[in-house]
Image (spheres, coloured by chain):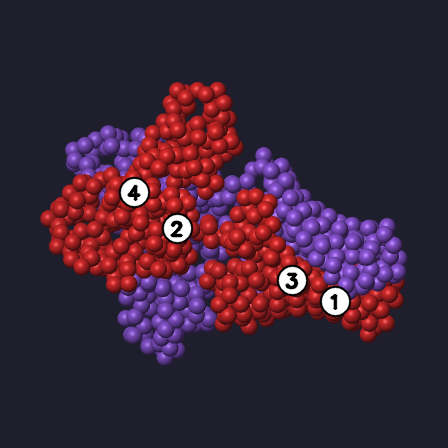
Chain colours: A red, B purple
């Protein structure tokens, strides 16, 4: 299809109707004209496993393979459960090694071996090799389909080499140049190959200034390199500098979205286990620890308030007002904390910026605190005609905003300096601080004032 | 440089020393061996404008141009302020049109015209054209350097065409095929060109199934197309289907990171204006509205508590305990809300999933609520030996968690259905709901119980 090739709602409904009607012929005809990514989207959208399977079984093995690599984990699980081992092996033979490895990795361990035994021995060896790398490293993302020629090759020999393996090299942008030990010496873009004279030595036109990454480098760091140097693909080397694979930018695009999701959920109080709730049971198990921890910090707040029980007995309305100080502090604290955590993740903020950030945030808190403090004080005065109460509320609000600014700035920076991921833990600490201190400041000042 | 080409801390410190010592010669020599992205990183890191300028002025115009396009907005502003119009014009002539447009767009409007007048007329025309498109659309991201041949061309003619403009086409991956009205008919990858016989007609090897985007499409949607179809570049067409530019994946990588940052900050209560705090003054102006809104919702919570003033007067410890119900509700609500908002952003969640999500979240809330409710009830009983109080606390906690699950699920979905961006507004609504209802439920039940 051309132009804005997004899956129309209408197409999805038509496909669903055809599935319900069992019209294989029309379905096959329709899907043969669709991009595998669109078919994958529809498979994700279909609700019943039988519907997914009915559609999937009609696909040519080439398309089916791309689709299997593209669907969501949940859908892939359903499909894999209903495919025989030989069928999965056939899919793996049609995929690039990075996608093949992802599919195999999704199988239960016992099944991985049996499936791989049915696959082509060469492909099996490559996938088994890739499976050894942790998922979130360069080795875990890379593919083994690499176009590499020896240093002594000519341009025409290189072109012939690519031509002979045109299918395997369907998505290359560079040819890598290696020596006889497999060490990466340089790379040549297809563009340069296209424009060079056939007899030219590859070594004469290769780029020796290139960016590569070691197999064990973290995926987030790898993504950062792609972003920084505007790369489309990057060679992966082992600890001896030998070429072992390459990573293409489309996989990096997925990594970036993944890492962003991880951070967003962490800031919302969902650690990695809690991020993919499939059933209520797993969600309870995953979220309970965090809520339990929050119960403890809430209890600390309760104990703080309990210290001032007599004050509240004397002026019960204080119980209604302390809420304002605490909530505003929490909100402002989260604002600051979110800025700092994201800045740290993007590499735009470093520990040396601590004082500057703290200064700016405290000034901001001062400004907002004075404004909000005055507004609340005025309203409380008109509501309860109690000057002491109004002043205490206004000033507590201001002070707690300063506390919030301080905690929001320093907590993430400190956690980062202690090599703890700031995204998950900052929220708990910052809100615990603004709650407990908010109560203490307000009720404390009130107790002194009356 | 090769391998993990990140900017070492040591290199940064060396560069800083050389700047402080005024050693232009050594600095020039060092920077001539560095990638422009690394120089840009150092320029961002340097703190004093004079330091940035000293380093920048030593760079060759080619490198200086790439660096200017790569530095942060803050650093670019400093550099642009200190460059003469002719110098900026020269930079623009060395950049691809998308980067050139970004640089010009960063100039104050009055200066944009004067600078463009000093630039090459052809480049000026292209940049002026690109400036018309809103920044966050396909037109705002695209570049005008497009390799396009007519339908009747041969492979060898195409190669010659690329060769003749090798510099301009330094980063192409495809050649576009157009008809005489400029309509996009197909595209040919460099790989296919490389492997084809010179006399072959372009039209015979071109890919007619391609993805393109219209100039006015949102950048987020454009990024989604890149992600979905694993694209490296995409042609941009006008409303008549005529080729007007192309977008390369490196710009999309930046868009994805940008959009993620926007969402993260929005969930933390920072709207787009509040996201880039340069000075405390701008931060105050940007954040005050949101904090002001939160003050109103906090006031609503206060009024809710005030309804039960007499209850609190009778049992002051209630003021300490209501905190637990409200805070747990807020946390759980944010957990659910974050999941749903992110799911909506990724296109993994749609309105039809509402009931399923609500069901799962309520079941989770039931599970967690029973556990946490029992734990808190037991502790309160041991603390205050008041059975009614313990039972009220435990059950309020459970009920408020159910409220949180409901709000966290339905608020983002409803906002999305009303075409309001759920990221910004959900937090306020969900926490306001769990606060007000938390107070009401706990104090209400307590009032009934005693």
Tag 2 and tag 4 share a subunit: yes
Give the percent coordinates (x, y) of residue A390.
82, 65
Q: Earlier in the sequence, mark 2 or mark 3?
A: 2
Q: Residue A186: image x %, image y %?
A: 22, 57
* Quadrant, the C terminus of chain A: bottom right
Query: Which chain is home to disc 4?
Result: A
Q: Is residue A370 left or right of residue B55?
A: right
Find residue A215 and report its horizontal and vertical position in percent: 32, 58
* In this view, A95 is above or below B320: above
First in sequence, mark 3 or 1: give its number: 1
Considering only order in the chain, which callout, 4 or 2, is on the residue closer to the N terminus?
4
Let me know if marks 4 and 1 both belong to one chain.
yes
Pick whichever, A442 or A270, lies toward us.
A270
Give the camera-side residue of A83 and A413: A83
Q: In the image, residue B234 lies at what x, y percent?
A: 37, 40
Chain under label 3? A
Q: Which mark is residue A252?
A: 2
Q: Write down the residue under mark 1.
A: A303
The residues tagged by marks 2 and 1 sit, at their Cα atoms, a distance apart of: 48 Å
Label 4 sits on residue: A117
Residue B90 location, quadrant: bottom left
Q: Which mark is residue A431?
A: 3
- Of circles 2 and 1, the one toward us is 1
Residue at figure coordinates x 46%, y 72% from the top left = B48
Per the model, the C-alpha gap separating discs 2 and 4 is 30 Å
Whether callout 2 and callout 1 share a subunit is answered: yes
**Between discs 4 and 3, the one toward the N terminus:** 4
The span from disc 3 to disc 1 (Cα, nearest Å) is 16 Å
Viewer-closest of B69 and A195: A195
Residue at (46%, 37%) from the top-left corner? A78
Label 1 element class: helix
């Amino acid at each position: 299809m051309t132009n804005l090739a997004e899956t129309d709602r209408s197409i999805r409904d038509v496909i669903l109707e055809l599935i319900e009607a069992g019209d294989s012929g029309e379905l096959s005809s329709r899907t043969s004209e669709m991009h595998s990514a669109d078919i994958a989207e529809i498979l994700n959208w279909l609700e019943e496993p039988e519907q997914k399977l009915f559609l999937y079984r009609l696909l040519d093995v080439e398309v089916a393979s791309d689709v299997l690599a593209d669907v969501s984990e949940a859908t892939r699980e359903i499909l894999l459960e209903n495919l025989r081992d030989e069928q999965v092996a056939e899919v793996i033979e049609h995929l690039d090694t990075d996608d093949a490895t992802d599919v195999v990795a999704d199988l239960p361990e016992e099944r991985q071996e049996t499936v791989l035994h049915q696959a082509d021995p060469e492909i099996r060896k490559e996938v088994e090799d890739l499976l050894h790398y942790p998922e979130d490293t360069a080795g875990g993302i890379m593919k083994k389909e690499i176009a590499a020629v020896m240093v002594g090759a000519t341009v025409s020999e290189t072109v012939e080499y690519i031509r002979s393996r045109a299918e395997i090299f369907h998505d290359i942008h560079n040819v890598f140049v290696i020596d006889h030990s497999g060490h990466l010496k340089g790379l040549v873009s297809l563009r340069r190959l296209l424009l060079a004279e056939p007899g030219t030595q590859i070594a004469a036109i290769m780029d020796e200034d290139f960016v590569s990454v070691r197999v064990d480098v973290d995926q987030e760091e790898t993504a950062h390199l792609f972003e920084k140097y505007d790369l489309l693909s990057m060679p992966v080397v082992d600890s001896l500098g030998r070429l072992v694979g390459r990573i293409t930018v489309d996989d990096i695009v997925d990594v970036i979205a993944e890492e962003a999701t991880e951070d967003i959920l962490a800031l919302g109080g969902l650690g990695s286990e809690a991020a993919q709730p499939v059933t209520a049971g797993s969600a309870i198990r995953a979220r309970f620890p965090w809520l339990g921890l929050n119960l403890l910090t809430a209890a600390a707040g309760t104990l703080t308030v309990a210290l001032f029980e007599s004050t509240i007995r004397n002026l019960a309305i204080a119980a209604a007002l302390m809420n304002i100080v605490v909530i505003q502090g929490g909100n402002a604290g989260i604002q600051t904390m979110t800025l700092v955590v994201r800045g740290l993740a993007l590499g735009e903020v470093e520990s040396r910026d601590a004082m500057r950030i703290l200064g700016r945030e405290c000034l901001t808190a001062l400004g907002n605190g004075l404004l909000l403090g005055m507004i609340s004080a005025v309203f409380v005065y008109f509501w309860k005609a109690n000057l002491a109460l109004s002043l205490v509320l206004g000033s507590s609000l201001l002070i707690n905003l300063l506390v919030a600014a301080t905690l929001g700035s320093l907590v993430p920076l400190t956690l980062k300096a202690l090599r703890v991921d700031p995204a998950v833990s900052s929220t708990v600490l910052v809100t615990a601080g603004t709650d407990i201190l908010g109560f203490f400041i307000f009720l404390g000042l009130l107790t002194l004032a009356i």
